[in-house]
C-alpha cells in the first residue's frame, strides 16, 4: 500500500523511490520462488505436502470407477502459477483457476 506522502508525488518520483524499488523487487523474488516450487523437481516435496491432501479428497469423493470426472468443475481461486489447477485437470476434472496478481498472470 502506498503511503499518503507517496500518493502526492509525481509518478516519476514514485518510480525512483526506494519504496517502489524494494516492493517491486520483493514481488519478483516471490514470483521466482513460486516458479521454482510449483514447476521444478526441487519443489516436488512441498507440492505433494500442499496439494496432495486436496487431490486425495477429490479422488476419494469422485472415484474414477463411479464418476465421469469431465462433468465435475473445480475452481481454484488465487491459483498463482496454476500448478494445482493443472494437477486437478490431469486427474480428469474440468479445472479453472483465477488469479489477481499480474506477476503470477504474466508468468503463464
Image (spheres, rainbow, N blue to C red):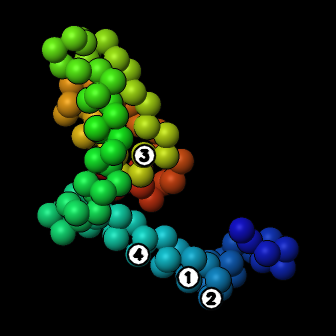
Which residue does the image show at 68% across and 78% down from the upper left?
14
The residue at which mark 2 appears reads as 18
Instruction: Compute the Cα span from label 3 to label 2.
Output: 30 Å
Locate residue 16 relative to residue 54 in the image: left or right. Answer: right
Label number found at residue 21: 1
The residue beneath circle 3 is: 79
Q: Earlier in the sequence, mark 3 or mark 1?
A: 1
Q: Is residue 3 above or below residue 103?
A: below
| Residue under the image location 56 percent in, 83 percent down | 22
Q: Residues within 10 Å of mark 4 (few under 14, many from 20)?
A: few
* Comparing labels 4 and 3, the label whose residue is closer to the camera: 3
Left or right, residue 64 beside residue 5: left
**In front: mark 1 or mark 4?**
4
Assess disc 2: are there few (<14), some (14-19) or many (≥20) residues with their C-alpha within 10 Å of its C-alpha: few
Q: Looking at the image, do the residues carrying marks 4 and 2 touch, with CB atoms under 8 Å apart? A: no
Residue occupied by mark 4: 29
Residue 47, image x, y percentages: 28, 56
Instruction: Give percent across and percent down for residue 62.
Output: 29, 21
Amino acid at each position: 500500500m502506498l503511503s499518503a506522502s507517496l500518493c502526492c508525488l509525481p509518478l516519476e518520483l514514485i518510480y525512483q523511490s526506494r519504496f517502489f524499488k524494494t516492493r517491486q523487487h520483493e514481488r519478483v523474488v516471490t514470483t521466482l520462488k513460486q516458479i521454482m516450487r510449483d514447476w521444478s523437481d526441487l519443489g516436488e516435496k512441498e507440492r505433494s505436502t500442499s496439494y496432495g491432501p486436496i487431490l486425495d479428497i477429490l479422488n476419494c469423493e469422485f472415484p474414477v470407477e463411479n464418476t465421469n470426472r469431465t462433468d465435475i468443475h473445480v475452481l481454484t481461486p488465487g491459483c498463482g502459477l496454476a500448478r494445482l489447477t493443472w494437477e486437478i485437470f490431469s486427474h480428469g476434472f474440468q479445472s479453472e483457476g483465477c488469479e489477481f496478481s499480474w506477476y503470477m498472470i504474466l508468468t503463464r
